[in-house]
Amino acid sequence: MSEKEKQVKQEEEQITEEDQCEEEQPVLADKEQAEQYLANWQRAQADFANFKKRTEQDRAEFSKFANSVLMCSLLSVIDDFERALETSSEAVGSGWVEGIELIYRKMMTELESQGLSRIEAEGQDFDPNFHQAVLYEEGKEGQVIEELQKGYMLHDRLLRPTMVKVGKGNQDTSKEDK
């Protein structure tokens, strides 16, 4: 082979190598783009699954607490029932009082079946998350002495805090500690 033929052959090989590189670059670019599309699709699919779960949780939470406004408005009726029953101790034998007690128990049973629960306060340590301190008197410091108005929870949410009288400590015990 002559020198010229060698040079022509070398040029042809170079051209074919360049053509192969140019052909491989679009394939690599297409492959990278396909991988990017796949990653984006997977991310969108995960985002949609998370959105769906969050929506279902929100819907369940909404239905769980949808009647909280109604229950809040009924709390004043419950308070009135309790006051009426407390003052009716003189007329215990009458059918009217028994009727009121029956209505009260029935109403409380229905509300409790819907998730309403009473907050126990008397004798407990004062907790500002569940109790509203209205008065302070002598008594064991930081402890609820008396419940002035009952508090209620709906499932795990506070509907109304318990209005309480809280102990501020005894003067006699503070002198003994010194």
Image: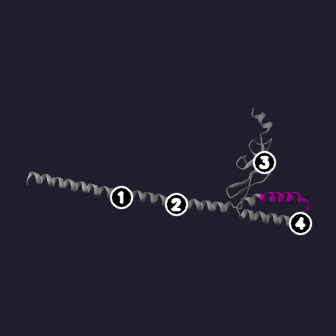
Q: CA distance from mark 4 to mark 3?
A: 31 Å
State which region is magenta: 73-92
Which quarter shows the N terminus? Answer: bottom left
> Residue 154's image quarter?
bottom right
Q: CA distance from mark 3 to mark 1?
A: 72 Å
SS at badge 1: helix
Q: For the point 85% across and 67% down, which residue is it? A: 99
**Label 1 belongs to which residue?**
30
Decide which of 99, 19 is in the foreground and name it: 19
SS at badge 3: strand
Q: Can residue 74 be found in the magenta stretch? A: yes
Whether residue 97 is situated above or below residue 145 in the rendered picture: below
Percent coordinates x, y for residue 6 in the rendering: 12, 53
Please say if the residues under marks 3 and 2 sit with CB atoms less than 8 Å apart.
no
Q: CA distance from mark 4 to mark 2?
A: 59 Å
> Which label is found at residue 48?
2
Q: For the point 35% across and 58% down, which residue is it? A: 30
> Residue 63's image quarter?
bottom right
SS at badge 2: helix
Q: CA distance from mark 3 to mark 2?
A: 48 Å
SS at badge 4: helix
Tell how many labels: 4
Q: Earlier in the sequence, mark 3 or mark 2?
A: 2
**Which kind of residue does numbered mark 4 sit on?**
Trp
Q: Earlier in the sequence, mark 4 or mark 2?
A: 2
Q: Earlier in the sequence, mark 4 or mark 3?
A: 4
**Label 3 belongs to which residue?**
164
Please say if the residues under marks 2 and 1 sit with CB atoms less than 8 Å apart.
no
Decide which of 46, 118 is in the foreground and name it: 46
